[in-house]
């Protein structure tokens, strides 16, 4: 959908059939959630990582969003006098040794060791770094990199280690990709990205021109033919990606429902993401009803009822008779509209 003014896109601004698009501010919020989820998982002893790939048209500001996250994170460490940084690696012009280090023979142990480049936030046994780095590492244009460089970058993104060089546990790793918007010079990233990465999609929304600080451009923003690509979904719903979504849900704070849905869907796909996002904000579950937990009928929503319907459809036939009695009593406390929904569901039993 190239060349359409933004005003013509407003009705379809946030969601396509496959992916959910975020503004620059929303993407920063989503990255912050990924970072917090990864730190929480690590503190709990989990091996789950939450790397993100930011997809978007060239020149849209993907790296700038990661830089904004780095500045935001640095505020957390100001009082502790901890060094915080931002590392952006342009993979399209790099060699693999620029990522994984230069090979040096270790004759004593009969093996090769790799001395890491000084501009990477590595912490390992070969190079002692007194200031353990905090911040954000961005692997830029990961789908434009040569094959060996892309493979090395994927090791850093997914496993945080390359040739024995380990990325600091305090550094959040993410990547950027142009995807379909630059199809002539990009390559697919492979199936491993489908369920081990959070895929976030950047698209400028109304008001994007404010950062230019130019009133004249702001006045014509709505009629500028901004190039916009419709991206394909990459995320897959698997047990691994669902575990990533679990940590996102546990780490959420004040994120908007749209950002939460986009971030979860970036891990598990849009269909599963919508279910899990609603689950994260639901007011009750079927187990709550059957176990006699008090449910405030004034706060029941249509999303709650939609999830309840899916739970009732999966309920084992052997427990339906006893559950029906409990549900009938509970439905009597609801408003007529919701009461009729519950009644119509259980009457089919």
Image (cartoon, rainbow, N blue to C red):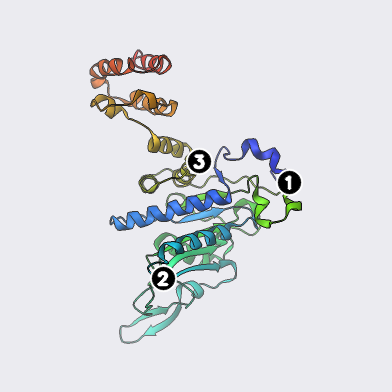
Marks 3/1: CA–CA distance: 26 Å
Check the picture and name the quadrant holding the C terminus: top left
Q: Residues within 10 Å of mark 2 (few under 14, many from 20)?
A: many
Total marks shown come to 3
Direction from residue 137 to residue 161 in the image, left or right:
left
Residue hosting label 2: 133
Q: Mark 1 — residue?
A: 3
What residue appears at the point 40 percent right and 70 percent down from the top-left corner? Answer: 82
Residue bearing mark 3: 258
Compared with 46, 79 (above or below) is: below
In this picture, residue 325 sits left or right of residue 238: left
Q: Nearer the viewer, residue 22 or 98?
A: 22
Neighbor class of circle 1 (other Cα within 10 Å; few <14, some 14-19, many 20+) is few
Q: Secondary structure at mark 1?
A: loop
Q: CA distance from mark 2 to mark 1?
A: 42 Å
- For the N terminus, the image quarter is top right
């Amino acid at each position: 959908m190239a060349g359409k003014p933004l005003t013509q896109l407003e009705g379809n601004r946030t969601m396509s059939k496959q992916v959910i698009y975020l503004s620059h501010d929303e993407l920063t919020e989503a990255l912050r959630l990924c970072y917090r989820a990864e730190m929480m998982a690590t503190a709990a002893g989990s091996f789950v990582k939450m790397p993100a790939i930011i997809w978007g048209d060239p020149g849209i500001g993907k790296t700038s969003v990661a830089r904004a996250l780095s500045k935001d994170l640095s505020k957390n460490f100001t009082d502790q006098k901890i060094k915080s940084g931002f590392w952006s690696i342009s993979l399209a012009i790099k060699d693999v040794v620029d990522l994984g280090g230069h090979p040096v023979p270790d004759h004593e142990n009969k093996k090769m060791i790799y001395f890491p480049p000084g501009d990477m936030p590595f912490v390992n046994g070969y190079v002692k770094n007194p200031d353990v780095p905090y911040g954000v590492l961005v692997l830029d244009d990961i789908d434009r990199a040569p094959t060996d460089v892309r493979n090395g970058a994927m090791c850093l993104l997914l496993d945080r280690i390359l040739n024995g060089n380990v990325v600091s546990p305090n550094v959040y790793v993410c990547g950027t990709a142009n995807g379909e918007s630059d199809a002539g010079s990009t390559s697919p990233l492979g199936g491993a990205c489908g369920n081990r990465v959070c895929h976030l999609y950047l698209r400028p929304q109304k008001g994007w021109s404010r950062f230019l600080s130019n009133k004249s451009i702001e006045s014509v923003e709505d009629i500028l033919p901004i190039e916009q690509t419709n991206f394909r979904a990459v995320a897959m719903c698997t047990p691994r990606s669902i575990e990533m979504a679990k940590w996102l849900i546990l780490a959420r704070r004040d994120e908007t429902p749209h950002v939460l849905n986009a971030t979860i869907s970036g891990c598990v796909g849009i269909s599963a993401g919508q279910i899990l996002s609603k689950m994260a904000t639901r007011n009750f579950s079927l187990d709550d009803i059957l176990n006699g937990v008090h449910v405030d009928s004034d706060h029941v929503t249509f999303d709650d009822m939609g999830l309840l319907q899916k739970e009732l459809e999966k309920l084992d036939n052997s427990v339906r008779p006893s559950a029906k009695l409990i549900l009938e009593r509970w439905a009597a406390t609801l408003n007529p509209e919701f009461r009729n929904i519950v009644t119509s569901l259980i009457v089919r039993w």
